[in-house]
Image (spheres, rainbow, N blue to C red):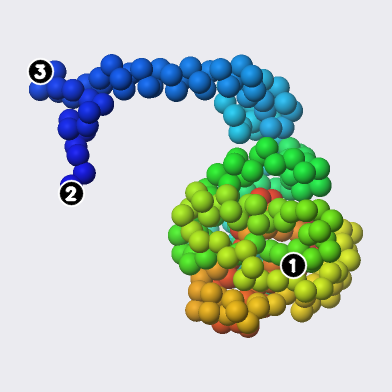
């Protein structure tokens, strides 16, 4: 049966040849608005950064918004790093030429500093997930060109003991939010990290590369999910790109056609 038009909907009625809301529809809308207003009184919307009162949930106040250094073009097409000027075409930074990554392209929402750093630390280390919906919207926007080409999204996995300690994988939460908005399937177990490694904080690029070399693999039962696919890896922060490169290499060895990386933040001065 064909779907009814607006004028055939019982929530609308014809008046002088036009469709208008019926009393029942107006009442439903009014009750919905009243319900939202009551909820805002019980749980008033607060800025995700500084917790001051704002007008909407899952948002930032203007002051916190201004403290986020959003990454905007012109960018290095490979590493996603900001470039000083636009040459009018695809640009590749000196860092990408000197040390090409194993992934194809990287994009990030913002620099890993200021309010973005505070939000990610609260999300990652303090079990504070209030910003997940905002993060998903940001990732879907910043990664639009990657997501348009993607077949599946895969979160960067945690080692089992670290997952047990933290109780959640922040990259998996980000992938779920991004996939929901971008309408892309998420394969949370298509990539695994069988062995743990020391924390990467404080390590140089070369040390990070050695630290994560060979730590990722694609399980045999996930090979068909990966082979021939364009994949977007989701993570919270790109520092030197060593983790993303190691993960991309494992996916490409399993037959992935393309592997791009999308993260909330990027460390722009990570050349060491």
The residue indicated by pointer 1 is: 243
The dot on residue 1 is 2
Q: Nearer the viewer, residue 15 or 135?
A: 15
SS category of the residue bearing label 2: loop
| Mark closer to the observer (3, 1) | 3
Name which of mark 1 and mark 2 comes first in the sequence. 2
Q: How packed is label 3: few (under 14 Cα within 10 Å), some, or many (20 or more)? A: few
Circles 3, 2 touching at the beta carbon (< 8 Å): no
Task: Name the residue at 58% across, 53% down.
Answer: 176
Rounded to the nearest whole Å, what is the CA distance between mark 3 and mark 1? 65 Å
Task: Name the residue at 58% across, 22% down.
Answer: 39
- Quarter occupied by residue 6: top left
- Quarter occupied by residue 241: bottom right
* x and y, in percent, of residue 135 in the image: 62, 44
The residue indicated by pointer 3 is: 16
Q: Nearer the viewer, residue 237 or 1?
A: 1
SS category of the residue bearing label 1: helix
Query: From this viewpoint, which residue is outermost toward the left?
Result: 17
């Amino acid at each position: 049966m064909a779907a009814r038009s607006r004028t055939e909907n019982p929530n609308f009625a014809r008046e002088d040849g036009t469709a208008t809301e019926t009393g029942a529809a107006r009442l439903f809308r009014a009750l919905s608005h009243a319900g939202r207003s009551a909820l805002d009184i019980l749980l008033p919307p607060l800025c995700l950064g500084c917790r001051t009162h704002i007008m909407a949930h899952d948002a930032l106040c203007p002051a916190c918004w201004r403290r986020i250094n959003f990454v905007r073009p012109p960018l290095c097409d490979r590493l996603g790093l900001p470039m000083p000027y636009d040459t009018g075409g695809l640009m590749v930074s000196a860092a990408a030429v000197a040390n090409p990554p194993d992934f194809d392209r990287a994009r990030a929402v913002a620099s890993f500093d200021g309010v973005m750093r505070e939000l990610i630390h609260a999300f990652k280390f303090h079990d504070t997930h209030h910003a997940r919906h905002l993060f998903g919207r940001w990732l879907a926007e910043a990664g639009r060109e990657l997501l348009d080409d993607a077949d599946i999204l895969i979160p960067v996995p945690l080692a089992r003991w670290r997952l047990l300690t933290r109780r959640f994988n922040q990259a998996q939460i980000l992938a779920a939010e991004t996939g929901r908005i971008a309408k892309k399937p998420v394969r949370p177990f298509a990539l695994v990290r069988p062995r743990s490694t020391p924390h990467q904080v404080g390590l140089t690029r070369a040390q990070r590369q050695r630290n994560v070399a060979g730590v990722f693999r694609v399980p045999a039962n996930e090979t068909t999910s990966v082979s021939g696919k364009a994949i977007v890896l989701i993570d919270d922060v790109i520092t030197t790109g060593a983790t993303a490169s190691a993960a991309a290499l494992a996916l490409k060895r399993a037959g992935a056609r393309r592997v791009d990386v999308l993260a909330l933040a990027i460390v722009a001065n990570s050349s060491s």
